[in-house]
Image (cartoon, rainbow, N blue to C red):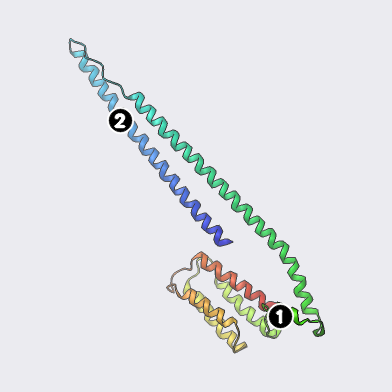
């Protein structure tokens, strides 16, 4: 959801940049028209002076001021319509995006209270109350003892703390390596090792001094939250 929001913001930024270029073009046109009108005014004055010096009247030059003024009005009107349409489009996109985010948040608020009692009741239930079919339908829960599972969740939280906006790839790789070593001392083999290797592979594509892109930070945080929740239950 956050990645989709970021992509839409990038698209809006491009539209705003196009709007800025159009405004620059309008300013250039207005400046050019002003210069042309000044030249015409100067030429007109020179012609009037020349006509005053000659005994015979010369035909008056054709004045293009009205045509230039009409052209400027049409150009400015077209730019104004474009600006209004662009602003209206941006406003509608922002409204749609905000409404979508609000609906997503409301859905999460509805789902979260339901999941919590299920987790707590599962923890308090006696061993004989477990159903085999329920165990098969809940493969996402860790099969480790509670103390080891919570330790792994703590190690994953240290990785999460390193994922801040503007974080450097080298720091994140160091946090991943230290967490993996600590988890291996807790349990020799666990599916989380495969996940950590995938995260290392993703971060390893960056030079160590480069910052991670926002979309990769968001993806890593999402995966980590899921794993931390799984090992915390």
- Measured as percent of width and height from the top left, residue 4 is found at 55, 59
Screen quadrant of the C terminus: bottom right
- Measured as percent of width and height from the top left, residue 42 is found at 27, 25
Left or right: residue 122 compared with residue 56: right
**Res 157 → quadrant:** bottom right
**Res 227 → quadrant:** bottom right
Residue toward you, 140 or 87 = 140
Q: Which residue is mark 2?
A: 36
> In the rendered image of this protein, does residue 98 appear above or below residue 173?
above
Provide the secondary structure element on which disc 2 rests.
Answer: helix
Tag in front: 1 or 2:
1
| Residue sitting farthest toward the front | 133
Left or right: residue 157 compared with residue 30: right
- Neighbourhood count class around disc 1 (C-alpha, 10 Å): few under 14, some 14–19, many 20 upward: few
- Neighbourhood count class around disc 2 (C-alpha, 10 Å): few under 14, some 14–19, many 20 upward: some
**Res 178 → quadrant:** bottom right
- Earlier residue among tags 1 and 2: 2
Q: Residue at x 50, y 43 (%)?
A: 86
Left or right: residue 90 compared with residue 226: left
Q: Which residue is mark 1?
A: 136
Provide the secondary structure element on which disc 1 rests.
Answer: helix
> In the rendered image of this protein, does residue 6 appear above or below residue 210?
above
Q: Residue at x 44, y 36 (%)?
A: 78
Screen quadrant of the N terminus: bottom right
Q: Residue at x 68, y 84 (%)?
A: 143
């Amino acid at each position: 959801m956050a990645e989709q929001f970021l992509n839409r913001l990038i698209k809006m930024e491009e539209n705003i940049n196009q709007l800025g270029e159009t405004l620059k073009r309008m300013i250039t046109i207005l400046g050019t028209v002003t210069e042309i009108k000044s030249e015409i005014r100067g030429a007109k004055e020179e012609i009037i002076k020349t006509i005053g010096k000659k005994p015979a009247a010369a035909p008056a030059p054709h004045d293009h001021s009205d045509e230039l003024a009409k052209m400027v009005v049409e150009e400015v009107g077209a730019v104004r319509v474009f600006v209004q349409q662009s602003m209206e489009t941006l406003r509608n996109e922002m409204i749609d995006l905000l409404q979508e985010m609000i609906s997503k948040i409301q859905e999460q608020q509805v789902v979260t209270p339901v999941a919590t009692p299920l987790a707590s009741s599962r923890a308090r239930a006696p061993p004989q109350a477990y159903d085999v079919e329920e165990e098969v339908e809940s493969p996402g829960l860790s099969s480790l003892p509670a103390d080891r599972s919570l330790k792994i969740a703590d190690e994953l939280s240290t990785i999460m703390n390193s994922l801040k906006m503007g974080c450097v790839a080298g720091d994140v790789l160091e946090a991943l390596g230290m967490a993996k070593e600590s988890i291996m001392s807790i349990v020799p083999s666990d599916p989380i090792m495969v996940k950590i290797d995938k995260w290392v592979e993703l971060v390893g594509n960056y030079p160590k001094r480069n910052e991670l892109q926002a979309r990769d930070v968001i993806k890593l945080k999402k995966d980590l939250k899921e794993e931390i929740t799984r090992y915390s239950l």
